Amino acid sequence: MAKLKLALYWAAACGGCDVAVLDINEKILDVAKLADIVFWPIALDFKYHHVEAMPDKSVDVCLFNGAIRSSEQEHIAKMLRSKSKVLVSFGSCACFGGIPALANLTTRAEIMERAYIEAPSNENPNKTLPQTKVSVPEGELTLPELYDNVLTLAQVVPVEYFVPGCPPTVDLILKVVNALATNSLPPVGATIASDKTLCDECDRKKEKKMISRIYRTHEIIPDPERCLLEQGLLCMGSATRGGCGALCVKVNIPCRGCFGPPAGVFDQGAKLVSSIASIYQTNGKQDIEKMVNELVDPAGTFYRFGMSVSMLKRRIPQKT
Amino acid sequence: MTSKVTINPITRLEGHGKIEVFLDDKGNVEDAYFQVVELRGFERFCIGRPAEEMPRIVPNICGVCPTPHNMASTKALDDLYGVEPTPTAKLIRQLHLNAFYVEDHYVHFFFLAAPDFVVGPDSDPALRNVVGLVNKVGIDIGGKVIDVRKKCREIIKLIAGKPCHPEGGLPGGVPRGITEEERKWIKETADYSVEFARFALEIFKQAVLDNKEYLKLVLSDAYKLNTYYMGLVDENKRVNFYEGKLRVVDPSGAEYALFDYRDYISHIGEWVEPWTYIRLTHLKKIGWNGLHDGKGTSLYRVGPLARLNVAEGMLTPLAQKEYESMYDTLGGKPSHHTLAYHWARLIEALQAAEHLQRIADDPLLTSKDIRNMDLKLKRRGIGCLEAARGTLIHHYETDERGIITKVNLIVATQHNAAPISLSVKKAAQAFIKGPEVKEGLLNMAEMAFRPYDPCLACATHALPGEMPLIVNIRDKHGDLIRSVQRD
């Protein structure tokens, strides 16, 4: 078999997805045997020439991580789409918006205000804000423009496969590599991860216990063997796709849903609300109010990684 | 006619970066600008989040150095809740941080920095990578680095679930303890790390110090910047990654300031320029006076060399010996030689490895007392530590329920952003003459920012082993005259 041409690219992301690829450690040599990496994530604007020079569909597989939040990222996503036979939405930012999509709870103007005007250590007497075009004595400097809205890759271009996770685990990455090596990719549109929920693969003991209070993580020391949700900690396991190996739960930390909604679930937050409703002991309106008060940040918790694909999508900016 | 040379990409922390170099009509370098071209807005979108969730959110600022963000955030929570972590919790946090230092410093050095020296700064770019390095030195460095990285990341995984996105970090403690069984393999990894650290320093000595030409390059003016330095020191003024006071020394090495990091606002100012999304830090009491070093500068640097420059010594004995030997060779303290960051990084990795050993031997490590639950919300918390690339400050304010109302973050690459611009300008002035820029010379200019360990570098260089680089030379209308490219 001819060697595959593989591209890896990153948009609005933290770099963790790229590091995750390194975490396959010595198996990276197997990848090198299988594929020529024709493109590794790093450049944004000035790699245009390089990408543009490639013929359409000349890249066999592109693993694209990161969300889309600037005109340039959208442009490069479209370009890589046309150059790639198979485009994989790699990691939670590309699949669901990820943590960068928490910015959808605010606006670009508020972000700029906070960063450049308000921050307490700033010295900005002239209230300077970064500009997309600036003249300096020697010439002109440019910066890309940011969008108000953080989008997923699939909201910008058609995508063949989804690999969730913040970051995708070594097992999942190897599963993808193996599917490529043996030419056994699943049907287009598939999410390459478990079809079950995280709860299904969690080792903790479930006792079908009701709760009368929701705790925040700093408020209690949970039993290391028992279900975290049944101890009152807001664990997203029942509303989250499995496949991560329950990494957070194993260190006594409740799941925050980075693998996105499980198969067949449209909205991760709605699914979690139904889980909480079924376990929270209520005897009337008073208890429901108490429960609502105990949920201190529903939007930022239920959609920690999934704001872009949620029913909410974003906060509607107030008209001023 | 002014030409423009674009070096892209260069670095990222809060996003991506590039460097623009402007040439005058003779082709000499007029100025250089280090631009950070993305902003993600953590300081705004963390408002409304419960404070205790911050250590789980901020690692996404940077997946290359997530551990320091997770831990600076956790320390800010300690301060916010007026709580000291239990002695065992503190040991486990330091175990996590030092394991991170070992793996991060080595990935940077071997995959990114060493090829320049061992293979040669102006050698064929196709050979100037980790494979070339292995061929040249004749041993499987690549395999060893992968091995030490893997072992250290196993420690991080044990403590924090995901090495790329560490979880947990609670005010007053850690979510999971260490067992005696686990101590055994942690100790093995610590011993292995010390052994590897000594081997790495030996390679550095053979490849760089024993080569007169390279040593001359290290000590040359092209790679020298006279700035202040900042870093954490313990009560004996030794290098400490996890805690202590911030110390600033002036370009002559004299102490300029020693302060509690909670008072950072009195000492550090952040300047806003319209051509970059990064805020440029400087010494507030001197005041922002632009991008220059030497007399009157308000710029300081952070990171490995800065930490050694501000300290009176290292925390551990083997690292201390290496520290003394480094300053002997460099001609005293402080050292302004930017390329010495690489050396300082290896000495720090040795300290981190020795510290791992010390923690692994500590009887308290396996105590079950991992959380101090005596929390009293103070509504303001500031955490600071030394990230691999330099001082990192997280500052949170909350409402009466512990919900975030304000966030201020100062990250390592911010402190170094202005110095990076200057370093590249100096090196470019020394090596780039005229629009016909030779690849090797371009790399010599690139070598001026590599010591700062531009963040994504370590993530993206393991396979190709080199930083892809495009230099576009443009006339003043922005039309492309010539393009130099290598991967």
Image (tube, grey):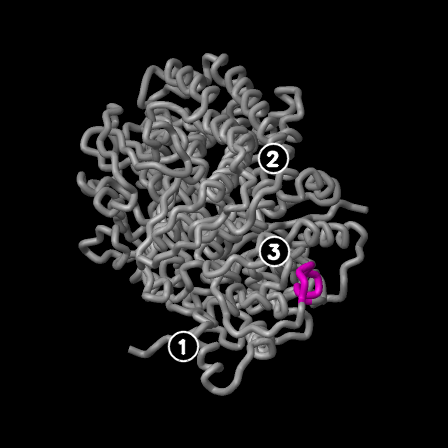
Residue that label 2 marks: B186
Q: Residues within 10 Å of mark 3 (few under 14, many from 20)?
A: some
Question: How far apart, in angstroms, are the residues tagged by discs 1 and 3?
Answer: 41 Å
**In the rendered view of the protein, which quadrant contains the N terminus of chain B?**
top left
Residue that label 1 marks: A316
The amino acid on which the numbered mark 2 sits, given as a three-letter code, is: Ile
Residue that label 3 marks: A224
Is residue B474 visible from the viewing direction of this image? yes
Label 2 marks a residue whose chain is: B
Residue A76 horizontal/vertical position (percent): 53, 57
Is residue B470 visible from the viewing direction of this image? no
Asked if residue A257 is positioned above or below residue B262 in the image, the reply reads below
> What secondary structure characterizes most of the magenta part?
loop
Asked if residue B301 is positioned above or below residue B266 in the image, the reply reads above
Label 1 marks a residue whose chain is: A
Within the magenta stretch, is there residue A198? yes
Q: Which sits in the foreground, A43 or A97?
A: A97
Residue B451, numbered label = none
At 36% from the left and 55% from the top, the residue drawn is B81
- Please name which of the two marks, 1 or 3, marks the residue nearer to the observer: 3
Question: How far apart, in angstroms, are the residues tagged by discs 3 and 2?
Answer: 22 Å
**Residues in magenta?**
A197-206
Residue B250 horizontal/vertical position (percent): 24, 29
